[in-house]
Image (cartoon, rainbow, N blue to C red):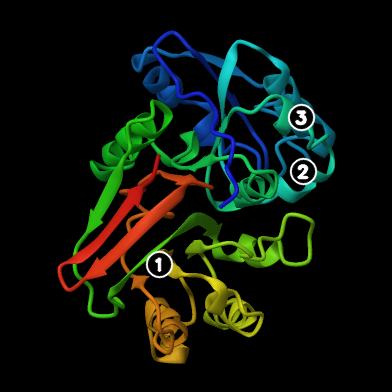
Amino acid sequence: MKKYLRPDFLKKGDTVAVVALASSLSEQSRQTMYWKELLESWGLHVKLGKHLYDSAPGEFAGRDEDRAADLTEMLLDPEVKAIISFRGGYGSMRTVRAMDLSLFDSHPKWLVGFSDITVFHAVLQSRGIESILGAMPSTIGPDAGDASKISEESLRKALFGEIRSYRTAPHAWNHTGSARGRLVGGNLSLVVSCLGTPWQNRLRENSILFIEDVDERMYNLDRMLLTLQQGGTFDRAKAIIIGQFTDTSGEDEWQRKALDLVNEYMAPLDKPVLFDFDCGHEHPNYSLYLGREVSLDVTKDGGYLKFEN
């Protein structure tokens, strides 16, 4: 397998940047600094993007070029060791279009986020750079419940290089077996949106695909799964990990739950499939090293996902 570039893990005293790469901050988010205090409690210094609190028509966090400028500045800043997107929403693909992507090659740093930030993970995978699918400031806080603490700790461990593996409980829909490959994917709707772009992952090397999604209608979820099925993505993947599918509407009309629909596409596959992995738009939201080579073992006792060195 091609060797990916792995940015340096963080240590106490390092600086992390927080920028807005897609949608603007909510009014509630503007009034709390819990996330900044949390990062500082880990021994990190926090630098904010100049346009973090901007807003523009379309609910963007400022103009495309300003969001791109913030990310560019943080990539070029030698003190910044990791860049965290404050939230997802919509706008990452527009931000990508407005920046010089070669800067990721010459200034590789950990980029963190999930949901709409899946676009950036796809870009980094296309350039052979690892990244972190993990909790963002907008998704954590004292009002997010006890499980949010698990998400926060998982993010801390990911940034400091402390995540080695995950175990999951048995699930009736799991497909037993073992596979090894590069961990790719993220939010299902963004994986599909990247089809046909320069950063589409065609799974030409051994790959383990992770997918999750939120706030979709059943017909749209079906269409996206059908697109990946008919395009051969599920067939090319060596294994598939199913994360959280949250707040799907139209389940009553379809007379099934979102995961029932997902299982209809997984059931015919003759390969390891792991259901109920806690990563997505709920807590706990475990962090994943995307672009890392992993091994996956699924048995009657559950799943074991190991990040290789």
Q: Is residue 16 above or below residue 94?
A: above
- In the picture of the structure, the residue carrying the numbered disc 1 is 242
Q: Is residue 120 above or below residue 187?
A: above
Question: Looking at the image, which is closer to me, 218 or 298?
Answer: 298
x, y (%) of residue 87? Answer: 56, 40
Please tell me whether mark 3 or mark 1 is closer to you in this view. 3
**Type of amino acid at the residue the image marks with label 1:** Ile
Using residue 90 as the reference point, say whether residue 87 is left or right of it. Answer: left
Placement of the C terminus among the 4 image quadrants:
top left
Within 10 Å of disc 2 (Cα), the crowding (few <14, some 14-19, many 20+) is some
x, y (%) of residue 270? Answer: 40, 84
Quarter-of-image position of residue 84: top right
> CA separation, marks 3 and 1?
32 Å
- In the picture of the structure, the residue carrying the numbered disc 2 is 96
SS class, disc 3: helix
**Type of amino acid at the residue the image marks with label 2:** Val
x, y (%) of residue 223? Answer: 62, 82
Question: Looking at the image, which is closer to me, 88 or 225?
Answer: 225
Within 10 Å of disc 1 (Cα), the crowding (few <14, some 14-19, many 20+) is many
Res 74 seen here: yes
